Image: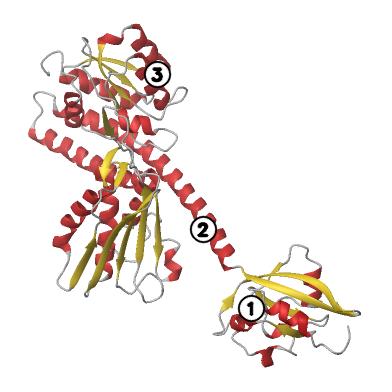
Amino acid sequence: MANDRRLPAAAALALDAIGDAVFVLDEQDIIVHVNEPAIRLTGMTRDHLVGTTVDRILEPAESGGTFAASLLAAPGGLSRPILGPMGNHVPLAWRAQAVEFTPGVTYLVCVTTSAAERYTADQAAVQAQKMEALGTLAGGVAHDFNNLLAAILGFAGLLKLTHGLDEESREQVYNIEQAARRGADIAGRLLAFSRGGLARFVRIDFRDVVSETMRLAAPTFANGIEAEISLPEAPMWVEGDFAQLQQAVLNVVLNARDAVHGGGVVTVRLSADDERIQLLISDTGTGVPEAVQARIFEPFFTTKAPGIGTGLGLAITFGIVRGHGGDVQLQSPPGRGAAFTITLPNARAVPEWQSAADAGDGNLVLVVDDDDLTRKSVTATLARLGYNVVEVGSGSVAVELVRARPGRFAAVLLDLVMPGMNGREVFHELSAVRSDLPVVLCTGYAADQHIDDVMKRSIAGLLQKPFTPENLSGMLTRVGAEPARRPR
């Protein structure tokens, strides 16, 4: 390369018009030209850059050869960070082309683009995979745990119904139930994280969810904390479970309240476009440290003191929102508070509804569950409550029974996660045989593959495992299945 490193004027003008940062090097890594974006990127003047080696701005790397040679040897370019104006780390993607602007004088034109966006996208993908894995694990644990607790609560309930039970024995049964309910609460929160739990979708004006949530949260706002609420005049329709969505919003609102415990503003703003409904919940607190943001939705992760936070609030919000086909994101610039954005699909179109008709002329309750202990406890409880019961451990057998005598069944208690024909497939087969047959879903875990939108709108009821005899009896009464005889 010639000793005269000056770039021809026409070439310099052309490179200066490029929007990306451009560094022109010779074969010894000496910078011979930079454009304005490159100057802004480094925070150095043109005079300080031109005539020096590129190592002056590059972060240290392994020795061996020149940067120019390494860049030319990499057809896809290189990722190499530089030191920014404040000594900060600026990831860059470098692409280079050897160009002879004049005969015999070769330059290496390096066009750089920020690798920050690509890095952020890669990190987001890794985080999404981690959250998905955690959700699958949590859901599986909750499912197995809830099946065991369902059996414990079921048999404890049967003991309570036993005549002649003395006070001491009743107290022990009560303690068993309380311990099982505490376990169920933990499993339920894990389930909410994994996929929001089991939900029955209806058409909801999301303004009502937000308004009711703020009404519930208002008494917990101490003096000095101001709530600014902005809701549009037009309805904001979503399809979902009102109670679950309220829980998701409440968790974020209470988190924002805690962030401004010494006084500040919590802003709640609802908006929408053609595709999405967006809820922004922000606060004027100190914000969330960058190192914490990546873990903020993980279950059992909390920055609060021991005994104050469980670390499940935002994890539950994450699961519920994702279970409703939405997303939740956090933005928290240093020292400028935190802003959580919940987005949900806009459901402006009126959905088709299937109405539940009379249950037919029968009074049989069909219990479908592959877990032997759960099935036996439910069957025994129903028999004690006065119901006529048929129990099966296979979805295909359940379908054949209903096909043979569709009018004999008053209701079906259907588990979702079963080998062979799963609950979703059984539900659609039963609906094809008799569309007005009340089907109550009973499950300890329901992921996306287990329940579809038609089920969410059409099922007669939901029972989250574990449930008590009172829950079971109340649900059957609501769907129109009455006992055939007086309870024993």
Reply above or below: 359 against 377.
above
* Residue type at the position of mark 2: Ala
Reply above or below: 439 against 44.
above
- Spatial CA distance of label 1 from label 2 is 23 Å
Q: Nearer the viewer, residue 330 or 343?
A: 343
Tell me what residue is drawn at x 70 percent, y 76 percent: 61
* Residue type at the position of mark 1: Ile
Farthest residue in the right direction?
Answer: 104
Name the quadrant of the C terminus: top left
Tell me what residue is drawn at x 79 percent, y 70 percent: 97
Q: Which mark is residue 426?
A: none
Residue 425: x %, y % from top left: 42, 24
- Spatial CA distance of label 3 from label 1 is 62 Å
Residue 486: x %, y % from top left: 10, 16
Q: Residues within 10 Å of mark 2 (few under 14, many from 20)?
A: few
Q: Residues within 10 Å of mark 1 (few under 14, many from 20)?
A: many
Q: Are marks 3 and 1 in contact (CB under 8 Å)?
A: no
Tell me what residue is drawn at x 69 percent, y 83 percent: 34
The residue that disc 1 covers is 82
Q: Is residue 104 visible?
A: yes
Farthest residue in the bottom direction?
Answer: 47
| Quarter-of-image position of residue 261 | bottom left
**Badge 2 or badge 3: first in the primary sequence:** 2
Quick one: SS at disc 3? helix
Q: Nearer the viewer, residue 479 or 77?
A: 77
Residue 356: x %, y % from top left: 24, 23
- Spatial CA distance of label 2 from label 3 is 40 Å
The residue that disc 2 covers is 124
**Badge 3 or badge 1: first in the primary sequence:** 1
* Residue type at the position of mark 3: Glu
Name the quadrant of the N terminus: bottom right
Q: Which mark is residue 429?
A: 3
